[in-house]
Structures are given as structure tokens and as C-alpha cells.
Image (spheres, grey):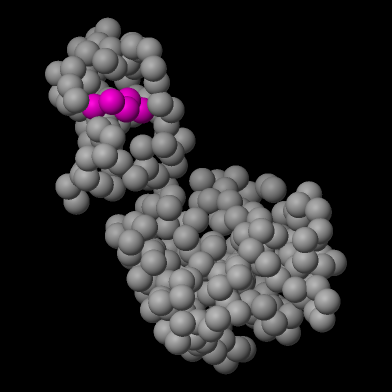
Amino acid sequence: MQIFLNEKAFSVEEGETTFAIRDNVKPDADIVVLNGFIIKEDTSLKEGDKMTLIKRGETPTNDELEGLLVARHTPGVHEKVKKATVGIAGLGGLGSNIAISLARIGIGKLILIDFDVVEPSNLNRQQYFVKHIGMLKTEALREILRDINPFVKVETRNVYLDGSNIEESFKEVDIIVEAFDNPKCKAELVNTVLHKLPEKPIVAASGMAGYFSNNMIATKKIKDKFYLVGDGISEAKPGCGLMAPRVAIAANHQANTVLRLIVGEEEV
């Protein structure tokens, strides 16, 4: 019978149990994960089960690390996520949060596009640090993602996106994420993708300013291949700013929508 131990094929006898495998392979492991869930009781293994053995505080080798990063995934997800390429337009409050969530799930490749640099007022909601002030957002985010998951391929483009380069910029990706602050830029990107790249799903956002109710933020399927996150009302304006909690809620709606599309769930 074959299972997967730390994401590698591993042969076991019928009736073998999780703790017996632990005791034989890594007796000092104090965390046993079975099919994405930490177990406390010995369990019989079945064909195709995924089992991970972890010792608290131990730094894994590079060969071991990728398997351990996905130990808590729902089974069957990583194989699909690893093959996907996602393009993110804008690396501010939405884009930086989305990129980090996608890196944490082990996305295969990210194409990150922004022309701006990190400045102090970004730090209230964007996933940068004081040390990144003055750096190109593309380079700062590449550095952060490398520290989170070095197995994600990251390609950066320091360009201002408009109707003249949107199609070329995203022709290689599987899914496009709109993460701009400017409403006109949002509209131009979405309309260009819908008309020139109609086969590619696009996940956009509108309405996440202020500190209004969490539950107003929702994900809607506007039409085939077009998904929109937000409350559709709370735009940033004088007296109504952008802050980390609500922006991050919207960003992770977008990231989860990307994940659902990758695994074949096209409805919201």
C-alpha cells in the first residue's frame, strides 16, 4: 500500500498505523499530521493518505521544507496550486496581502506588477516594513515572499499598466488579480481583460475603506470569468481612509477566490 510521507511516496503494509510509522521513521517527531489535521491518537492508514512528521523547533533541510510547508493543506490542493501562475496588478494594501496568502499556500508562480515605491503611509495596511521605505514595491515584496516560501517563482515588472500593455503583461498567467487603488485604473484593467483576454478569470475589488461591518464585504460573480470583492459602497475619500483590517479582509476574499478557481470551484 502506498501513502505519502512528508509529500513523498512511501510504501507501508496493510493495517499499518500512523504512530508505528512515526516510531520507525522519526521517533522524535512530536507532531503528526494526517491529511492536513494534527492527530493525537494512533490511526490506521489508508491508500493515498498524506502523513507528515514534524519535530518542534527543528529547522528542516531544503529538501524537506516544501513538504512541511503544505502539511496542513487540504489533500489534493497542493498539486493543483503548484502548477498555477497568477498575475497581480498593484502591490499595495490588496496586492501585497494577496501575494503573501498565495505564497503561503505554495502557488507555483507569481507575476507581480507595480511601478511605485514603499512610502511611510503605506505601512498602515500594506505588508511592508520600515526597512523597505524607498524600495520598489516589486523588490520589497519579492524579498518578503522569499522569506515566506522560497519555492514560489516570482517574476516582477516595474511598469505602469494601461491599455497599451495589459494584454502583453498577463498573456502568460492563468488568473489575473486587480489590486489597484485608483478606480479609473481598476476599470481600465478589468475592461481590457474582459475584451482582450476573455478566457482568463479576473478577480477585482471595490469598496473596502473605513471600519464598517466585516460582513458587508462579499465576493460576487459578476459574469463568466469576472469576480468582484468588496461592499461596492465604501470607497476611500476624505474622512474615510484605508486601514489594515478591512483591506486585508477584502484581499483574502480575493486570494481565496483565486484558490477556488485553481481547484475548479467557479461559483462563489
**Splitting the image into 4 quarters, where does residue 152 fall?**
bottom left
| Residue 208 horizontal side relative to residue 131, left or right | right
Q: Does the magenta stretch include residue 130?
A: no
Residue nearest the observer in this picture, 103 or 27:
27
Image position of 163 with respect to 10: above or below:
below
Question: Horizontal placement of 106 versus 92: left or right?
Answer: left
Where is residue 34 shown, x and y percent of the image? Answer: 37, 25
Q: Nearer the viewer, residue 161 or 242?
A: 242
Residue 9 sits in quarter = top left
Between 28 and 169, the one lying in front of the other is 28
Q: Which residue is drawn at 51% across and 67% down?
A: 127
Residue 167 found in image quarter: bottom right
Q: Is residue 122 above or below residue 46?
A: below
Residue 115, image x and y in percent? 50, 87
Number of marks:
0
Which of 140/254 is in front? 140
Query: In the picture shown, does residue 59 fall above or below 197?
Result: above
The answer to whether any part of residue 171 appears in the image is no
Q: Which residue appears at 67% of the width and 78% of the height?
A: 181
In the picture, measured across the screen, residue 216 lies left or right of residue 58, that is right
Magenta stretch containing residue 31, yes or no?
yes
Is residue 20 at all visible to an observer of this figure?
A: yes
* Predominant SS along the magenta part: strand
- Tell me residue 153's x, y (percent): 33, 65
Of all residues, the one furthest to the left in this rendering is: 24
Residue visible at 28% across and 25% down in the picture: 30
Q: Quadrant of the N terminus?
A: top left
Give the residue displayed 17% in from the left and 22% down from the top. Answer: 27
Residue 95 at x, y = what percent? Answer: 55, 69
Stretch in magenta: 29-33
Q: Is residue 62 left or right of residue 132?
A: left
